[in-house]
Amino acid sequence: MTGSLLTFRGTAGESFQLDVAMPGSRILVGCGAAGEGPAPDAVVLLDATLDQCGQLPRLVADGWAGPVYATPTTAARVPLVLADAAQLLAEEAECAAAAGWPEPASPGKLDVAGVAALLKPLALGTPHRIEGGAVLRFGAAGRAPGASWAELSLGARRLAVVPAVGSMHHPLLALPQPRPACDTLVLTSPPCHGGSEHYVGRFAAAVHRAVSRNGSLLIPVSAAGLTDVVLTVLRDLTDAREIPPLPVLLDSPIGLDLVAQQSGVRLPETLVEHREAGDARLPRGPAIVLAGTETAEYGRVRSHLERMLPDPSHGVLLAGPVPPGTPAARLGAGERQVSVRGRYLPVRAEITRTGDFATTARDAEFRVWAESGPPPETAFLLRAGADRTARTLRADNGWCTVVPADGEQVLW
């Protein structure tokens, strides 16, 4: 195991990447951060979000042609997510150019087909020998379709990398599989704190308040985000007559393509898809609009924000965790002026936060999951909010828990 190093990247931001260096090979777990050093021998993806796969087109453009390992569901979703992001970035560049705002240039047509050709679907629970002699095994993490934890074994040593663990009681999503026994455990996201049982009530109340103002409700959500869950909750609330039957606009380049891959999704009868740029317009009277991205850093949601934020009749509902420093995070923090495409807008619309719709395990659920296996030698917890969980595992279970710095290297 001499020379087997872990390098943590993106620990303070939205995109996470774990560099696993072994004798004769280098594997990236996650490819959302702009990595440093030589090109990897392989990439392992834990889900299909951009903070896992967003830098794959850059690697391919630089001539990289290594394998990308993922669960079958994640492998099927990655090309759709990248195609959606490429279209949104291109549209954003056009809007910026028309307004004279120096937005970063669009990457143009990303080689989505080139990335898709490198994807290697691996079945859950089945060990596979990969580059460097390591053995890779995926297990279900819950929380989102295809989301997984990854176990890497090299000789007698085992490393487990786990994203946010899904709730044990969510009606739509699969349950997470038990935590694998390992020497080194990397938890890429801390559990959610506090309760989650009131998200439906907060959602319904936000809808009613917008209707009472004769306004609409905007929900920033990305293609691989909570779209399937939000649509199902809308249908259930409408069927139960807890909210009125409102027009639901899904403004996305790929529409329902990703939602169709998830079983159990219930679509509102009033749902309308807008796939073409500039096609979505608010109807007369109240409506519900879903548009990406959830961070509001780019994407069609920004056009809706330009129209809706200055108008006190409208509302914006923030669903799910939002990375710090993003426009959506500033809205959630109560800022009354937010910059969109180079212009500050007054925030007169009502801002509501509902949490993650109970998709992620809370403290108690996470503790049950984490304690289901023997204690690791070392557990590394990443990103904002990890200190609290690290202290709890250390105090109650005697674990050696560390919150690493961005770029820190350790032996595993």
Image (cartoon, rainbow, N blue to C red):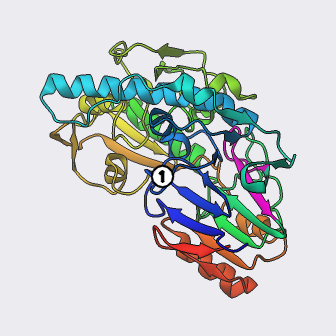
Image coordinates of residue 70 in percent, x first then y, are 70, 40
Residue pushed farthest front?
24
Residue at the spot 67% in from the left edge and 28% down from the top edge: 76
| Position above or below: 129 against 302 | below
- Residue 320, given in percent of the width and then of the height, sits at 52, 48
Location of residue 23 (image quadrant): bottom right
Residue 153 among those drawn in magenta: yes
Amino acid type for the residue under numbered disc 1: Ser
158 is higher (above) or lower (below) than 130: below
> Between 111 and 405, which is closer to the camera in this rendering?
111
Using residue 219 as the reference point, say whether residue 376 is left or right of it: right
At horizontal 48% and vertical 18% (from top left) the residue drawn is 247
The x and y percentages for residue 198 are 59, 51
Is the residue marked by circle 1 packed among few (<14), some (14-19), or many (20+) residues within 10 Å?
many
The magenta region covers 138-154
Instruction: Examine the rendering and report whether any part of residue 146 can be seen.
Output: yes
147 relative position to 297: left or right: right
Q: Is residue 96 left or right of residue 128?
A: left
Residue positioned 54% across, 72% down in the render? 409
Figure quadrant of residue 210: top left
Secondary structure beneath disc 1? loop
Q: Which residue is mark 1?
A: 15
